Image: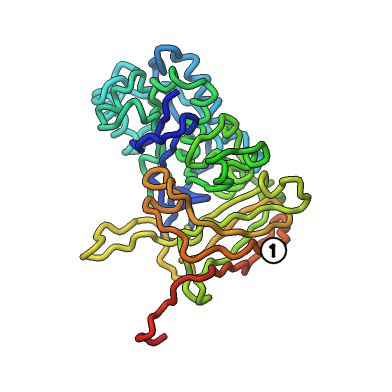
Amino acid sequence: MPVAALRGLVAGTLATVLLYTAGTVDAGGPLFVRANGLPFVWSTAAPIQYRTDNGPLSTETGEAEARARVISMFNVWQSVSTASISFNRAGFINSTGAFTDGDVSTLAEYDAVNSNCSSSGQNPVIYDTDGAILVGLGMDETSVIGFAGPCTISASQILSGSVVMNGLFDVDLTDAQYDTAFVHEIGHFAGLDHSQINVNCLLGCNLANLAGLPTMFPFLLHESQITPSVDDIAWISRLYPAASFATTHGTITGRVFFTDGDSQAQLVNVIARRVNTGANEDRTTAVSNVSGYKFRIFHGNPITNPDASNFGTEAPDDIGLFEIPVPAGTYTIEVETINEEFVDGSSVGAQILIPMPGTAPPPSGPIAVGAGNTAAGNDVTLIGTPPRFDQFEGP
């Protein structure tokens, strides 16, 4: 079985791992954040309408079977009871420009459909039966399983999105593995970023750790990830809350600081683990967020980085802020560096990797969180970070 990477990421070395990419800004939560700190999300006034390709997914899967599988993939997220997001297959991809035959099979047809998506014309799910479209886009069809995400974002919300599925991997992977990969990608389509929880699973995973492994983990380690974890459920519900979300979940907030207790540290992974009952609950019931997830990653300047990020706030109080939606209960908080393999399109936090400074303190807690309530002020101070100023500078 080949190793697959999404959006052109170079394939890894573990034969059971699929690497995901998202083109992300933030992590353990929303894919993109607005300047006011709110996430970019779809309108939920009506179901999100998507359209599927009218050609075969692969040499083994015809259109009818592919359509049923895609509907099932979207239904995974729609079925989260505490979330209000919903989807509807509106039919086949509409003709537009050079695309007229129903089956998106050439780069010119893809360009036409993608352009229509970019103008908010439709939300296509495209089957690249033989990888020819990916090749035309400059990607390696033997290592890229596909990609998904928003096409157009307005000042306040996601307006359109697309999914591209490489049919070559439908032949090489089991249906369960392939479908799990695209449930993850539909999470990006919905506006979710990657989450790092139970990262020890990269080296081996027991059942308790596997149960807490998010669908939105950057790598696919097991087909059971097709079922959303506690982290996935918490975040899709935070972005699209149903009425039941406030009656089942609360929030843990705080900031991560350098050792001086004053300077805030961004891009540190923060995990809340529930400890009500023991029995490995801390491994199965966990939710994460990256510190500073709201804060703009790249500010830009005319010398070193003129291309500033357009996403996130510029509020200094957001630099080290974390906000973690959790099922009601009692939790500990722990921090860790983002894994060095989670870079570029498979990033957790930002596409560049900034290791956590210093070392992590012991987990803090217990922290009691009631449904509909916020447990605030759960700050974390890193140990042994360099001083803010050297001996020749003032405070």
Judged from this view, the residue extending furthest toward the left is 303
Residue 209 picture location, percent across and down: 64, 42
Label 1 environment density (alpha carbons within 10 Å; few <14, some 14–19, many ≥20): some
Image-based side of 306 in relation to 62, left or right: left
Would you name the residue on which mark 1 appears? 365
Task: Tell me: residue 235, above or below residue 78.
Answer: below
Residue that appears at 49% across and 59% down: 268
Residue 150 picture location, percent across and down: 40, 41
Task: Tell me: residue 241, above or below residue 269.
Answer: above
Residue 277 picture location, percent across and down: 78, 50
Q: Which image quarter holds the C terminus? A: bottom left
Label 1 sits on a secondary structure element that is strand
- In-front residue for pair 294/19: 19
Please say whether residue 162 is visible from this viewpoint: no
Q: Amino acid at mark 1?
A: Gly
Image-based side of 179 in relation to 2, left or right: right
Judged from this view, the residue extending furthest toward the right is 277
Residue 53 picture location, percent across and down: 39, 21
- In-front residue for pair 289/218: 218
Please say whether residue 32 is visible from this viewpoint: yes
Image-based side of 139 in relation to 193, left or right: left
